[in-house]
Image (tube, helix red, strand yellow):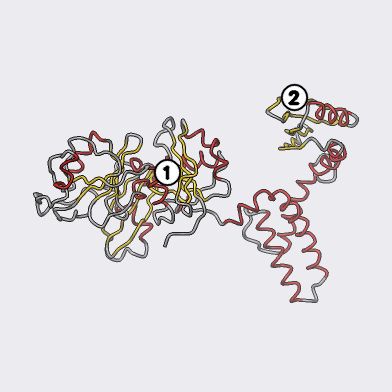
């Protein structure tokens, strides 16, 4: 069943870094294109980040970078299919399977349809989307988003590449130069090309000249129906074998946007599986949560000591303190004793507070806060504390240059202040400030 969404942003990723990236915003409810365009290359994804806000985003992987194929599952391997699949494909692939992402698309009986692509490609695409601040719901091979016909293939040309959908989970991306050889290998009926006036003649059953033992290159047997057609949404290339049947012309990106909604062929599996939504909302509050968790942990452990007579209540506090400990210090998953938990938390608190002296981060923040509060027009974007050099360096943004000067004057009363170059970007002024204690 197709999911109910208001609008979606579909981004067709580029095979190479310098290739253009096409995108389209589609409204399933209004059944119309809201916006569309083409970026010069994948590094320009930030230009369409605003379209991703409050919309579901799908990414399309170029079919030329994804191998869609079918393998036979050995008897007794179904339970460990995820681990076995890469080795079933090892003889077919020219690369080390450790460098490839193998995703199970569909399992039927003793056969499985899979998608294979390089980890390098997947990591590059996801990094580019992340750098642009775009969160995606799925990555789907573009050819599988074309309309599906019960009999025949579906074809459309996009950006110089022919996308061919063979079945529910099989397809390719092919350049026109080697498309004839590939079509011939699929047992597609080879008939002469015809003019528009002969369109009806092309719809008549064609003679089946294929041999009985020929199979599709991907491993599935092509139907021997003489009326096996290639349904095309863009003009068919001249001189191609096969029975080509023109469908109502459509914008290819619109076809792909309609087909991607709710598609089951999501390549975000294994190491690329999406994290739960709550982690996304927790991330901006991580630093605050860590400080609060440390405080709660200390309070929690003190309460456990003071209410030892109440075993039930003590168990509740211990469970809570261990949960917080693992959230704050995920590297320490094993908690052998309560004293170990206290010691690790105390060590982390001491590290943040600078121990018994005033060189820690928290004393610095306490001394800087009054001056920062007097210049509310200036916002600190990032902060770096260097204990060895005895300095704090922060990047800030303000409306005007004088706000930086005002802050520098206030800080000079207690610290040595070094102000970096100020730059105006639109309506904002950005700059760096280094603060050290006076000698």
Q: How many marks?
A: 2
- Closest to the camera, between mark 2 and mark 1, is 2
Q: How far across and how far down the image is residue 54, in percent? A: 58, 49
Q: SS of the residue at dot 2?
A: loop
Left or right of residue 267: residue 300: right
Per the image, the residue denoted by label 1 is: 119
Location of residue 407 (image quadrant): top right
Answer few, some or many: residues within 10 Å of disc 2's Cα (few below 14, many 20 plus, some between 14 and 19): few
Upstream in the sequence, badge 2 or badge 1? 1
Per the image, the residue denoted by label 2 is: 420
Residue nearest the observer in this picture, 338 or 1? 1
Mark pair 2, 1: CA separation: 41 Å
Residue furthest out toward the right: 413
Left or right of residue 16: residue 416: right
Residue furthest out toward the top: 421
Q: Is residue 82 above or below residue 122?
A: below
């Amino acid at each position: 069943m197709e999911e109910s969404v208001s609008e979606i942003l579909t981004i067709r990723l580029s095979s190479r870094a310098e290739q253009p990236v096409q995108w389209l915003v589609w409204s399933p409810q209004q059944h119309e294109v809201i916006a569309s365009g083409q970026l010069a290359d994948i590094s320009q994804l930030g230009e369409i980040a605003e379209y991703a806000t409050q919309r579901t985003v799908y990414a399309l992987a170029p079919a030329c970078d994804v191998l869609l194929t079918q393998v036979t599952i050995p008897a007794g391997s179904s339970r460990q299919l995820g681990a076995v699949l890469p080795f079933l494909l090892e003889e077919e692939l020219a690369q080390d399977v450790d460098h490839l992402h193998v995703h199970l698309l569909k399992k039927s009986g003793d056969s499985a349809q899979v998608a294979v692509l390089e980890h390098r490609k997947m990591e590059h695409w996801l990094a580019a989307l992340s750098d642009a601040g775009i969160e995606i719901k799925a990555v789907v091979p573009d050819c599988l988003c074309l309309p599906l016909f019960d009999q025949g293939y579906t074809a459309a040309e996009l950006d110089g590449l022919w996308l061919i959908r063979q079945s529910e989970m099989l397809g390719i991306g092919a350049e026109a130069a080697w498309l004839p050889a590939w079509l011939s290998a699929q047992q597609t009926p080879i008939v002469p090309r015809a003019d528009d006036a002969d369109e009806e003649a092309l719809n008549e059953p064609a003679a089946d000249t294929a041999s009985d033992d020929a199979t599709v290159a991907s491993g599935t047997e092509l139907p021997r129906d003489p009326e096996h057609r290639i349904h095309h949404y863009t003009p068919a290339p001249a001189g191609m074998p096969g029975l080509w049947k023109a469908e109502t012309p459509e914008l290819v990106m619109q076809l792909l946007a309609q087909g991607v909604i709710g598609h089951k062929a999501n390549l975000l599996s294994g190491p690329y599986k999406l994290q739960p939504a709550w982690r996304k909302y927790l991330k901006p509050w991580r630093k605050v949560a860590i400080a609060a968790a440390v405080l709660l942990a200390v309070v929690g452990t003190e309460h456990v000591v003071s209410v030892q007579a109440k075993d039930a209540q003590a168990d509740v506090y211990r469970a809570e303190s261990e949960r917080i400990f693992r959230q704050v210090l995920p590297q320490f998953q094993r908690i052998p004793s309560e004293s170990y938990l206290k010691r690790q938390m105390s060590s982390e608190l001491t590290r943040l507070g600078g121990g018994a002296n005033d060189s820690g981060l928290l004393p610095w923040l306490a001394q800087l806060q009054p001056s920062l509060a007097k210049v509310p027009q200036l916002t600190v974007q990032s902060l770096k504390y260097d204990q060895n050099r005895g300095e704090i360096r922060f990047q800030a943004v303000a409306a005007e240059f004088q706000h930086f000067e005002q802050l520098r004057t206030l800080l000079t009363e207690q610290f040595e202040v070094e102000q970096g170059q100020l730059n105006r970007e639109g309506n904002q002024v950005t700059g760096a400030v280094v603060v050290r204690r006076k000698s």
